Image: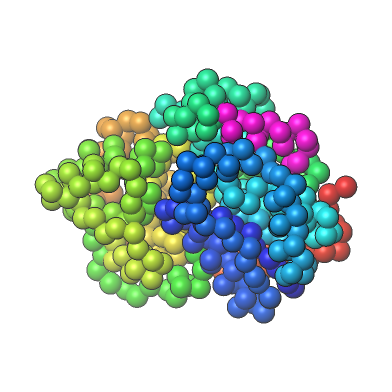
Amino acid sequence: MKVLFAHCRYQHTGGEDRAVDAEMAALREAGHDVSLLERDNEAISTIWDKAKTAWSLPGTDALRTELRAEIAAHAPDILHAHNIFPLITASLYDAARDLGVPVVQTLHNYRNICASALLMRDGRICEDCVGASPYQAVLHRCYRNSTLGSFALARMIARHRDKGTWSQSVDRFIALSEFSKSRFVAAGFPSGRITVKPNSPGALFAARPEERERSGALYVGRLSPEKGIAPLLRLWKKDWPPLRVIGDGPDAPVLDEAVRDGRAVALGSLGSEAINDEMRRAAVCIIPSRCYENFPMVISEAFASSLPVLASNIGALGELVQEDRTGAHFDPFDPESMTRTIDAAFADPQRLRRWGAAAREHYEKHLTTAGTTAQQTAIYESLMIGDGARV
């Protein structure tokens, strides 16, 4: 098959970018012709860029024409969209429809139903706009605490809800977990067009880790409020092994403070190979997110690395990490709950090894590149023969 991916790169590289790269590599390895229609959000630099981008969020005729020409040049059998915010927009769907190309959209976050993309407000879970007016986001300045930015996002969400974009212009959605699917269905997305397919970490993580002595804890992700890294660092004890932290973002000053007093090690932003190395030497991975995650790449990478996960017991994380099998849960809003869970993990290295073995077993059964690629190509093939396509 000829598959065209569409993706806007984030200004801070994260799990979505890694997922896109891993999927393209896997499809190519399976013998498919894969190309990329790409935009880079680093291009949004001036105030004029931001204003123009905000106005164009629902899509424009000019962008539809531009994207139609790009798609036609690749002549794909399938168009697979990932992050289309904010430079590609839903004009992509209209351009593909003009050319008769089936569209698959992976739902990496909640941008299509929530201005913040996180279903989160004021540091807490918020579903006020799910199935209701998205303009509530303007009142609460949900997008980067900006009234104008929140209005632009709310306008985009409302426009496509009224237009019927999700029921008419996308042939198949891929949700990354059952929990994620449930929130989109609650927001009005057609349940029958949503297939659940997890992220695979890609071929780099496929080899079974060598038996070795493991130690310490690892955090991989953006250093930002919704990820819960600052509260985790503030409660981190000096008698625990220093937390090794991969990533960057606005909460970096909290990490700097923890580094100064020896409670953490800052590793910065690393590529997949270095992440792989860190995961194969750590004893446990910690995901303290305060928002609804979909399927963080760090989970599939950790499981492939025989690395158990301590995670927040909210949203999909409660589904993806099996209690006392592949890891354990805590309440990310309760420091005592977090401390108890981490204390118990460090106190029983044998149990961590048992959880790690179960994590690898889960990877081999459900998250291998071969398995998830087969799921993906089955979706493509069903659309190419007209099964479940838009009407």
Any magenta on residue 153? yes
As drawn, 380 above or below 82: below
- x and y percent of residue 146 in the render? 47, 29
As drawn, 111 above or below 385: above
- Residue at the location (37% across, 34% down)? 331
Residue 280: quadrant of the picture: bottom left
Coloured how? rainbow
Residue 208: quadrant of the picture: bottom left
- x and y percent of residue 41 in the render? 50, 52
As drawn, 287 above or below 282: above
Left or right of 378, for residue 99:
right
- Residue at the location (31% across, 65% down)? 278
- Residue at the location (66% across, 24% down)? 132
- Helix, strand or loop for the magenta stretch, by majority: helix
- Residue at the location (49% across, 33% down)? 143
Left or right of 11, for residue 105:
right
Query: From which residue to which does the magenta span run?
Result: 151-166
Any magenta on residue 299? no
Count of numbered marks: 0
- x and y percent of residue 182 in the render? 64, 38
Residue 205: quadrant of the picture: bottom left
Q: Nearer the viewer, residue 6 or 370?
A: 6
- x and y percent of residue 106 in the render? 63, 52
Left or right of 340, for residue 49:
right
Asked if one can make out residue 378 in the rendered structure from this viewpoint, the answer is: no
- Outermost residue toward the top? 139
Q: Nearer the viewer, residue 351 or 290?
A: 290
Asked if one can make out residue 132 in the rendered structure from this viewpoint, the answer is: yes
Say which quadrant the N terminus sits in. bottom right
